[in-house]
Amino acid sequence: MASVSVSFIGGGAMAQAIAGGILESKTLGSESIHASATSNRFESWWTSRGMSFTIDNAECLNKSQVIVMAVKPHLYTEVFRRLADQGVKAENKLWVSIMAGVTLEDLQAAISTVTGGSGINDRVVRTIPNTPCKVGEGSVAVTYNMNCSQEDKVLVTKIFSGVARVTEIPERLQNAFAAMAGSGPAYIYQVIEGMADGGVMMGLPRALAVEHAAATVRGAATMVMQEKEKHSAQLKDEVCSPGGSTIRGVHKLEEGGVRVAFINAIQAACNRNEELGKK
Ligand SMILES: NC(=O)c1ccc[n+]([C@@H]2O[C@H](COP(=O)([O-])OP(=O)(O)OC[C@H]3O[C@@H](n4cnc5c(N)ncnc54)[C@H](OP(=O)(O)O)[C@@H]3O)[C@@H](O)[C@H]2O)c1
């Protein structure tokens, strides 16, 4: 992707996770990645890796054709208002939002303040990534508005596929995806912590317990992804020998409501995403 460059408006945790992953996967070189924020607190993170950083959003915007909106969701309208006040005109950009809960319609309206139209002609992409993008193991769902071309889709897929599994979904599923995969790493860290606590309780050293609890989660996930012909219940059954120890553990997890707890967690997070989207 020699001629493409990407500007991140907002240079915090998620922008760094994605930009770091893009660099690591060599999808783009550091000279093609730019970022802006309100303060210099993350400047050295960007510049020490050869990317440019500024506290001037307009300057950052002018450097690229692909603009990733990576500020907190409640701040983006203010970002566009200020750009419009500065007289910034940003035409022919591909706008990629990673902001949780912000709809394509709302994004288009905000973007139109710097593109001079009603927003209905701008190319806008709504995505929801997760933090494992930082280590090239992310999950990203994307929804394109009707102005995006096949070329735009290929480009966005290329940018994210260096760091994540990328899937196009209809916009109505974005909040559910965010609740499951966007928030999901937090749930799995709790699982790893709980497994390690169990190991420690039964005598394993903490560091060993954490390392192997995490490796077990990754190994089990890889089995689910690779042995696609098997339902996860079958993979579970294969670990449970009759009258053995694993089925005793599985019984305790069922008694604790483990599956219901996950379903409830994702339902609660999804409902919250819907609420936030209405504010
Ligand atoms: N974290 C996640 O797991 C996750 C997952 C999916 C989606 N997201 C989405 O990613 C977005 C960013 O989240 P985050 O966790 O990366 O937040 P963050 O670490 O707080 O970073 C936000 C960045 O936005 C900058 N910013 C604030 N106001 C700005 C403005 N007016 N102009 C330019 N930059 C501005 C901040 O600047 P300063 O550095 O100067 O404060 C900071 O660099 C959010 O919309 C969130 O919904 C996050």
Image: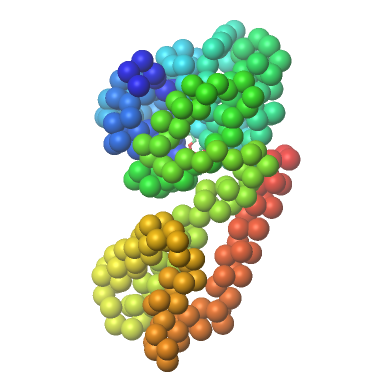
Horizontal and vertical percent position of residue 38: 48, 27
Left or right: 23, with 34 as reference point: left
Left or right: 269, with 233 as reference point: right
Q: Is residue 112 above or below residue 48?
A: above
**In this view, which residue lies farthest toward the bottom?**
243
Residue at left offset 36%, top offset 15% = 3
Q: Quadrant of the N terminus?
A: top left
Horizontal and vertical percent position of residue 42: 38, 33
Q: Is residue 191 above or below residue 157?
A: below
Camera-side residue: 75 or 216? 216
Horizontal and vertical percent position of residue 209: 30, 71
Q: Is residue 80 visible?
A: no
Q: Is residue 145 visible?
A: yes
Residue at left offset 40%, top offset 72% = 195
Q: Is residue 191 above or below residue 151?
A: below
Q: Is residue 80 above or below residue 43?
A: above
Horizontal and vertical percent position of residue 71: 53, 32
User: Which of the 4 image quadrants contains residue 128?
Assistant: top right
**In this view, which residue lies farthest toward the right?**
278
Residue at left offset 30%, top offset 68% = 212
Camera-side residue: 146 or 113? 146
User: Which of the 4 image quadrants contains residue 279?
Assistant: top right
Camera-side residue: 246 or 193? 246
Residue at left offset 45%, top offset 77% = 237
Rendered image coloring scheme: rainbow
